Structures are given as C-alpha cells and as structure tokens.
Amino acid sequence: MDFSDSPEEAAFRAKASDWLDANATRRDGSEKAQDHFMARDADEVARARDWQARKAEAGWAGLTWPRAFGGRDATPIEQVIWNQEEGRYAVPPNVFLIGIGLVGPTVMIHGTDDQKTTFLPRALTGEDIWCQLFSEPAAGSDLAGIRTRARREGDEWVISGQKVWTSGAHYSTHGILLARTDPQVPKHKGMTMFLVNMSDPAIETRPIRQISGSSSFNEVFIDDLRVADSARLGGESEGWKVALTTLMNERFSISVGRASGGARAEELIDLATRVERNGRPAFEDGEVRARIADFIARQRGLEFTSYRVMTSLSRGDAPGEEGSIGKLLLGKLRQEMGAFGMELAGTAAGISAKSGDDVARWRNEYLTAPGNRIAGGSDEIQRTIIGERILGLPPEIRVDKDVAFSEL
C-alpha cells in the first residue's frame, strides 16, 4: 500500500483545495462533517442542486467521467482525493451519489448512445436526481428474487410491482429499475433493467418513518407504468449483469473514503471529557479509554483497507469485491460506537430534543446504523462475497440457482 500522494496527485489536491477555499466555507473545529447523502427537506435539495451546478461548471463534477459527458477524464484516485478535500467544507448533502456514483458508470457500460447523451450530462449538473429501485418486500436480501413484472407490448413495456427501502425516491426525478421479464427461466436470467421517470403518475412514492425520526427511505408502488423500449438499459433478460455493475460501484462508493462513516471515534473523547462517570470525568475511567481506543483502532483498520483499494485504483484497476469489507465492518462499528455514545450520555441520550447537539448525534448514529447494515447488501451478503470472491472459500450451495422462477 502507498499512503502518500504522488507528485501529480499532490498537485491535483492543491488545485481542489484552492477551488474549495474560493467557493465554500471550511468547517471549524466544532462543526461536524457532512455524514449523509440524503436531503432532509426541499431546501437541502435546492442547495445541493446549486452546489452541484457550480461544481459542474468548474469541472469538478463526475471527475472520472469522459469529457464528452462533462467529466474530467480524471483517475479514480483523484475522485477519492476530491471527496477527502470536499469533506473539509460545509457543503450540502451529496444527493447525487446514486446518479453519479452508481447509475452513471452503469449507463456508460450498458447504455445506448442516446441514453448516454440524454442522462449523463443532466446528472452531472444536478438537473436530475436518481434513485435505485432494486429491493422488494418479498425478496429480502435475495435481489434475484424480485417480483416486479415487466411485460412487452409492441415497442413498450408495462411494469407493475412494489419496491421498498428506496433512498431519496421522494425527491428523485429518475430511477434505475430492475424488473422480471421472463419468469420461465432461472431467476438470475429473467430480469431486465429500465430507466424510469419518477414523476410518471403510474409511480407512487410513500416515505417510510424510521426509528430515528427521519424519512429518507421509501416504498414505491408501480401500477402499469408504460415505458418505451428505449428506456431499457442493456439487453433483454440481461438485468442481472447490469445490476452487478451498479452494485460493485455502490459498495465502493459506500466504503472507500468514508472509513469512519458518520461520527468519528475521536469525537467520543470529547464527549467523555464532558460527562461524568462515578463523579469524575468519564474519560478518566480506564474502561472508557479502552473502549474508545478499540474503536479508534478499528476505524484506522478500515481506513487502511480503503487505502489498499485506493492504491489499486491509482494503478488503473476497477472497483472490486474489496468494497464489501468496508461495507461489512463499517455498519457494525457505527452501531457499537452509537451505543457507547448513548451509554456515556446517560438518560440525556433518550430525552434530548435538539437534533444538532452531540447527544442527539450519537442517538441518531445508533438508530440509523441497523439500516446501514442492510442498505447496499446485508451483512450476510457481504460475508458471502468476501468468503467466496476474496478468500476463495467453497461457494454457498444454492438449490434454486437453475430452477425456473415460476416454479419457486
């Protein structure tokens, strides 16, 4: 692993920092880093769109995309450097993560020329916001078990079904949707991907109230949605191949460059110096210091794992299964850190009503972590990927792999 910037990377970092200094406000020591990718209200969406447009105009949006589509032809490691530098500033949430990090690369590989010229530039400028219509109530972690159906009628497809846990669907303009088009073949072979307009009357979005109090996830109901065949992304019944491209980029986007996720372990030190345990500052307790030290060590391990992937990217490699390591460990770490922050805060953690204070921050960290361990593939799915594709362990026995979906 190489932990230092090359001369070219150092120069790129300096240019990014100079532009950010001129166009954004650097966070002070008391201000928390932006730790979410979803807008909380319409005002945040508007501010995010404005910030995205400014980045696009200056050439800082979709850095790794081809110049023909508004990108910069930058290396993947330069995108990581930009993410690190932007994180030092008070900027709106990155509601364009799915469009630029997941959908864009998928369209570049599997899309038609018309799809590329239509959708990619609008994603970069912030005109379009994308959501990912994959998960379904009956499928659980088995993405290939989806039941949303798409039947062909001439030059159109008619789609009906239900999606769930769709992040940002309530303010998204477009969605990438996986549907079953052939139930007579094994489930991995009978799916097709589509690009849909979320404003179509045939699509109904219902925000889900989460235990944390937010409503960033949604149920999405599709009732006889008609789309032209030109909205199909990739070949008919090749949806699984297209989805794998999206998922690889999703796990990479979640893990690399965000080893700490939301709150950082070092912030527990600040909390522990301000709350008491047995009549003394909690940080003077050896057990408290040991717990925080363990969190910091695990956090550093995640960061070093991300550096390994970053080094691979700097050599021109594509995102691979290594992203599952960060995805798996990050969710568990965030949940344990949130629980310990609440333990330190005591009863205040349960009654604090101020969403911006650090006590509420740790409560929110604890309550949102279970969702993080499901989104983008559950812990069990990540363990299977790591075991089979990284460690080379014998593959899981799948009795339904070659059975027609209609017979399951």
Image (cartoon, grey):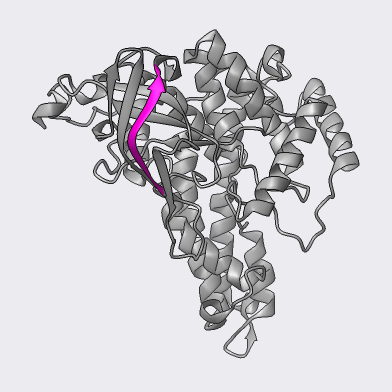
Apparent side of residue 153 relative to residue 334 in the rendered image (left or right): left
Location of residue 177 with respect to 28 vertically, above or below: above
**In the orientation shown, which residue stands out farthest toward the bottom?**
279
Residue in view at x 37 percent, y 26 percent: 226
Residue extending farthest left: 407
The answer to which image quadrant residue 21 occupies is top right
Instruction: Give residue 4's position: percent from left, percent from top.
Output: 74, 31
Closest to the observer: 26 or 122?
122
Give whichever of 146, 275 is nearer the camera.
146
* Residue 254 point in image, percent of width and height: 53, 40
For the point 68% across and 20% down, the residue is: 75
Report the side of 200 relative to 379 (left or right).
right
In the image, residue 220 lies in the stretch drawn in magenta: yes
Q: Give the image quarter of residue 307.
A: top right
**What type of secondary structure mainly makes up the magenta span?**
strand
Task: Name the residue rendered at 71%, 58% in the picture.
Answer: 32
Of residues 339 and 115, the one nearer the viewer is 115
Looking at the rendered image, the quarter that the C terminus falls into is: top left
Give percent across and percent down for residue 47: 73, 47
Q: Is residue 290 visible?
A: no
Left/right of residue 114 with respect to residue 14 in the rendered view? left
Q: Quadrant of the N terminus?
A: top right
Residue range highlighted in magenta: 219-228
